[in-house]
Image (tube, rainbow, N blue to C red):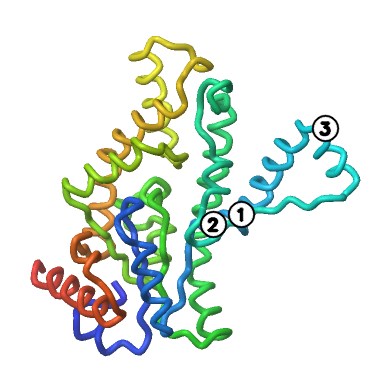
Amino acid sequence: MIYENAQQWQQARRKHVLLFGMSGLGKTHVSNILRESGGWFHYSVDYRIGTRYMGEHIVDNFKREAMRNPFLAHLLRSDSIYIASNITFDNLAPLSTYLGKPGDPARGGIPFAEYRKRQDQHRTAEISALLDTPHFIERARDLYEYDNFVCDSGGSICEVVDPDNPDDPVLKKLSENLLMVWIKGGPEHVDKLVARFESAPKPMYFNPDFLEQTWADYCARKGVAEDQVDPDDFMRFAYRACLDHRQPLYRAMAENWGVTVEAADIAQVRTAGDFDALIARALDARASQG
């Protein structure tokens, strides 16, 4: 790790961290606090995915829908209107909408083969966006004169790396440039995340093997053909399974590549100083474990 203990962290002229964990546990919230403090550059992996790597796919999907409307189709063909994605750090709906949900088209689903294609596009984009991180560290320092840098990773980072492989190209490059910090949730957080997802199922990225198995399990359990699947019901089913699937992956990332902080402690962070102190304690805790 680039900081071995609290003293190294506190004395570092430049602080670089990557936050990872399930969406909804405070990664973006803390990143915003650090950015607003004036001393930190905030790099959002999901934003990079949705702009640099999947922006064209997203906008083409908007245009495809618009072309179904004769009025809009005419305007598009004549270049009379302009369609763009207004994705932001806090609103990733354009990316989520493009990923979609598999199942019955009459209920807003897309064919499973198309869903898999878009999932594969996301995987490639996420790996590229993660590998861009060192470039943005340099860019933030050279262009904007930021010494401190926080990488706000997506919840699916654990799906595109192998945390048990010491030569994993993504984790190796990231750990050489940033301190990897797992925001770990407890059972009470899991219940809240599930409840939130139950009320509004959102598109997600899944590991290909996990997705294939979960899709097959769901179709078999419900006794339905692929084009009869309720998209939202499948996403609820997959999300619950995904929480259990990702937890050991996050843990391995923290044990092999970084440190752990509790989501309850992250929720108490109000200033950059609070965050510094929390990371120092996490580094001391790891050092004391040998």
Q: What residue would you read off at disc 1?
A: 53
Q: Residue at x 31, y 80 (%)?
A: 272
Which numbered marker is on residue 119?
Answer: none
- Asked if residue 126 is positioned above or below residue 176 in the image, the reply reads above
Q: Residues within 10 Å of mark 2 (few under 14, many from 20)?
A: some
Quadrant of the drawing holding the N terminus: bottom left
Judged by depth in the image, the label closer to the viewer, 1 or 3, is 3
Q: Nearer the viewer, residue 112 or 6?
A: 112
Q: Secondary structure at mark 2?
A: helix
The answer for how far apart the CA atoms under marks 1 and 3 are is: 30 Å
- CA neighbours of label 3 inside 10 A, class few (<14), some (14 to 19), many (20+): few
Between discs 1 and 3, the one toward the N terminus: 1
Tell me whether circle 2 and circle 1 mark residues in contact (CB < 8 Å): yes
State yes or no: discs 1 and 3 in contact (Cβ < 8 Å): no
Q: Which residue is mark 3?
A: 70
Q: Amino acid at mark 3?
A: Pro
Tell me the quarter of the picture where residue 289 sits.
bottom left
> Which residue is the site of mark 2?
128
